[in-house]
Image (cartoon, helix red, strand yellow):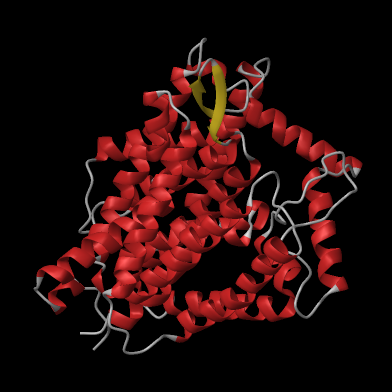
């Protein structure tokens, strides 16, 4: 008999199990997808966001420690062991660099790096590895959609509060979510994050629209269409090339999964893709004919990126990548530093590598990258252990993981990629408790 993804909370009926079930699910949802909701608090109160963000990190840390302490560990999966082994190496690197070598990440202090590395990445991820048995997948998947929808609504609300000319004018520039403190405007959500949340909401809306007749998780059609519209708006407003490209990639992946699940013929798939091509051609014609005089920021950035590539021009990210690779080749076994020491561009600062794999190579060398590749291989292998029906239940969470993974290839740093590590722990741990 195959595995089933049932409500694992039936393992125990005591209040501790139900409490851990609630805490674990919402720890995942709020750490990974709740930041735009959290960011609205300083906007509404018109106060500095730093104490509020720090308070949330303290709460997440306390909840994670509670879940770890109250979990009786009988065995540790290979994925968790690999994750902890990597973080032993990486923790040595950042502690050595910050506390003994005096290295600084951008203009932050040691507490900033340590609070994210240990308080948002390491400890919460361990708690998810240990408490995944208390996760009821249909419920957390449904709540994931609602959290993403509320988060995207919060983003648009914030943008409208700071827009003097209406939402249409925001398409002409790159959107930032801000808070005003004592007459000074401070950025609290960057364009990449805005685009990323728009991407995830759009993808999940499309998924639930496609599977509205085959899923136990059912949303009203008008809610899904509205959420798709809101998600696409934020995706465009963010004007970030990465989330837009990754949206297209994951959209085709969802379509492929849908056709495979429905056992539709290759001929039908060909017709479907043909109609998509016709729609894209018509849309492009409409833009070029009627909206060509409007300076959409996302279009401008795509054109500039294409022209820069053709002319061989480099961006700051290219210099950072080159520096990270050089630091790795200089110290290939254990790496060189947790920050890139690049001097080639006009922007000289110690920052992460903006690519997760380069960041791992730069900071932990071949030792760390071997463990990370093994961890990701285990994650993919665990997902593909499920049959097609089971994948349908896990798929929204899988899409969220892939969204964060793809983003990490262009904007990734190890100690700031906490949503990715938490989602990896979740996907890795599901099969351990899926057998009846």
Q: Quadrant of the N terminus?
A: bottom left
Q: Nearer the viewer, residue 147 or 65?
A: 65
Identify whether 327 is placed above or below 218.
Answer: below
- Write down the quadrant of residue 211 in the picture: bottom left
Q: Position of residue 64 (x, y in %)?
A: 36, 64
- Write down the quadrant of residue 429 in the picture: bottom left
Q: In percent of the image, x 56 and y 81: which residue is there?
A: 85
Q: Is residue 201 left or right of residue 370?
A: left
Q: How many marks?
A: 0
- Write down the quadrant of residue 399 in the picture: bottom left
Which residue in the rendered view is the most extreme toward the front? 100
Q: Position of residue 420 (x, y in %)?
A: 50, 61
Q: Is residue 294 left or right of residue 141?
A: right
Q: In percent of the image, x 53 and y 15: which residue is there?
A: 183
Q: In percent of the image, x 78 and y 46: which residue is there?
A: 349
Q: Nearer the viewer, residue 226 or 424?
A: 424
Q: Position of residue 335 (x, y in %)?
A: 76, 73
Identify whether 151 is placed above or below 16.
Answer: above
Q: Position of residue 165 (x, y in %)?
A: 52, 10
Residue 176 appears in the picture as rendered: no
Q: Quadrant of the C terminus?
A: bottom left
Q: Is residue 248 left or right of residue 225?
A: right
Q: In percent of the image, x 44 and y 18: which residue is there?
A: 161
Identify whether 356 is placed above or below 432.
Answer: above
Residue 63 appears in the picture as rendered: yes
Q: Nearer the viewer, residue 115 or 74?
A: 115
Q: Nearer the viewer, residue 150 or 95?
A: 95
């Amino acid at each position: 008999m195959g595995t089933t993804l049932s409500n694992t909370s039936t393992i125990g009926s005591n209040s501790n199990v139900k409490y851990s079930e609630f805490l674990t699910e919402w720890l995942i949802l709020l750490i990974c997808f709740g930041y735009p909701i959290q960011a609205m608090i300083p906007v509404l109160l018109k106060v500095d966001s730093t104490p509020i963000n720090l308070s949330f990190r303290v709460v997440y840390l306390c909840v994670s420690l509670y879940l770890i302490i109250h979990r009786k560990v009988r065995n540790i999966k290979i994925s968790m062991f690999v994750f902890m082994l990597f973080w032993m190496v990486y923790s040595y690197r950042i502690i050595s660099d910050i506390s003994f070598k005096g290295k600084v990440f951008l203009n932050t202090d040691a507490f900033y790096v340590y609070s994210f590395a240990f308080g948002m990445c390491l400890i919460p991820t361990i708690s998810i590895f240990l408490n995944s048995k208390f996760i009821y997948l249909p419920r957390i998947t449904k709540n994931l959609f609602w959290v993403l929808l509320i988060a995207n609504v919060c983003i648009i609300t914030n943008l409208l509060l700071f827009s003097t000319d209406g939402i249409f004018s925001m398409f002409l520039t790159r959107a930032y979510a801000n808070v005003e403190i004592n007459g000074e405007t401070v950025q609290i959500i960057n364009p990449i994050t805005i685009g990323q949340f728009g991407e995830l909401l759009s993808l999940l809306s499309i998924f639930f629209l496609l599977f509205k007749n085959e899923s136990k998780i059912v949303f009203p059609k008008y809610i899904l269409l509205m959420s798709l519209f809101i998600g696409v708006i934020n995706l465009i407003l963010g004007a970030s090339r990465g989330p837009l490209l990754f949206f297209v990639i994951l959209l085709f992946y969802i379509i492929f999964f849908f056709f495979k699940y429905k056992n539709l013929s290759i001929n039908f798939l060909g017709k479907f893709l043909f109609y998509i091509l016709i729609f894209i051609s018509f849309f492009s014609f409409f833009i070029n004919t009627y909206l060509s005089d409007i300076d959409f920021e996302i279009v401008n950035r795509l054109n500039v990126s294409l022209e820069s590539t053709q002319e061989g021009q480099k961006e700051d990210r290219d210099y950072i990548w080159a520096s990270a690779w050089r630091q790795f080749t200089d110290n290939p076994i254990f790496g060189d530093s947790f920050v890139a020491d690049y001097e080639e561009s006009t922007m000289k600062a110690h920052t992460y590598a903006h690519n997760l794999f380069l960041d791992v190579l730069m900071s932990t060398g071949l030792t760390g990258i071997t463990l990370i590749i093994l961890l990701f291989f285990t994650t993919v292998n665990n997902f593909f252990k499920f049959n097609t029906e089971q994948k349908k239940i896990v798929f929204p969470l899988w899409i969220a993981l892939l969204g964060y993974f793809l983003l990490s290839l262009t904007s990734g740093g190890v100690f700031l990629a906490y949503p990715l590590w938490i989602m990896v722990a979740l996907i890795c741990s599901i099969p351990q408790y899926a057998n009846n």
